[in-house]
């Protein structure tokens, strides 16, 4: 696992399958990703980076999520799919190499580090849980290309609240 860090991410267009899930939802992931890639293929869309799982609203163990990929340009989406622009800004992030079942703890490490450092996430409490401007897990590789789960690489990233951020583009991170 890398040390937590703060990076600036550029805005990134994306398309995603939006749905509510309840942890654990591991058995649903092949169907979810199958639907996502079928949607992309059917519309001639090519991912511009790795797949990500965006956590919109968190009320453990229930999550409102978007399962998506970044694109080179914005598109319109329909049905259960959504599209938009992932927001630019400063993000707290950590990269983990290991099995997916450790990601709840990895998220906890990042959240604990940020709180200890006095950082505030771009989020708010609401009736159905905590809403995030952008909180995601970016999957740099998957079981298809890396069958050894101890070598799976995932970046957890959460947008920080930053009223002084000027919105100047800065490319220091890859993916959404």
Image: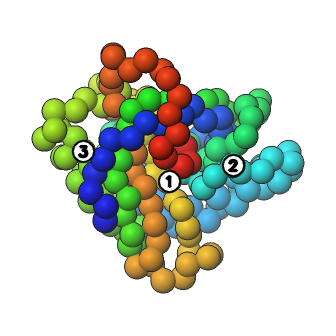
Q: Which corner quadrant holds the N terminus? A: bottom left
State which mark lies toward you, 1 or 2.
2
Quadrant in which residue 136 is drawn: top left
In depth, the one of 30 and 117 nearer the eye is 117
Label 3: how many Cα within 10 Å (few below 14, some 14–19, many 20+): many
Residue at which label 1 appears: 138
Q: Earlier in the sequence, mark 1 or mark 3?
A: 3
Q: Residue at x 52, y 39 (%)?
A: 171
Label 1: how many Cα within 10 Å (few below 14, some 14–19, many 20+): many
State the residue lying farthest toward the bottom: 148
Above/below status of 150 relative to 173: below
- SS at badge 1: strand
Residue 20 in view here: no
| Disc 1/disc 2 C-alpha distance (Å) | 13 Å
Label 2: how many Cα within 10 Å (few below 14, some 14–19, many 20+): some
Relative to 162, is 118 on the left or the right? Answer: left
Above/below status of 76 relative to 110: above
Q: Earlier in the sequence, mark 3 or mark 2?
A: 2
State which mark lies toward you, 3 or 2.
2
Q: Position of residue 124 (x, y in %)?
A: 32, 24
Residue at which label 2 appears: 48
Q: Position of residue 69 (x, y in %)?
A: 64, 48
- SS at badge 2: loop
Residue at which label 3 appears: 111
């Amino acid at each position: 696992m890398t040390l937590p860090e703060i990076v600036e991410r550029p805005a990134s267009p994306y398309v995603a399958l939006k749905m509510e899930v309840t942890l654990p939802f591991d058995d649903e992931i092949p169907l979810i990703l199958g639907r996502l890639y079928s949607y992309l293929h059917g519309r001639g869309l090519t991912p511009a980076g790795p797949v990500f799982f965006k956590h919109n609203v968190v009320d453990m163990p229930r999550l409102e999520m978007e399962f998506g990929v970044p694109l080179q340009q914005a598109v319109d989406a329909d049905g259960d799919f959504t599209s938009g622009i992932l927001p630019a800004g400063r993000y707290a992030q950590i990269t983990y190499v290991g099995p997916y079942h450790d990601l709840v703890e990895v998220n906890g490490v990042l959240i604990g580090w940020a709180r200890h450092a006095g950082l505030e996430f771009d989020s708010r409490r609401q009736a159905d849980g905590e809403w995030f401007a952008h909180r995601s897990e970016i999957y740099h590789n998957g079981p298809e290309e890396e069958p050894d789960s101890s070598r799976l690489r995932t970046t957890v990233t959460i947008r920080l609240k930053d009223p002084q951020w000027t919105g100047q583009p800065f490319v220091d991170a890859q993916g959404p």
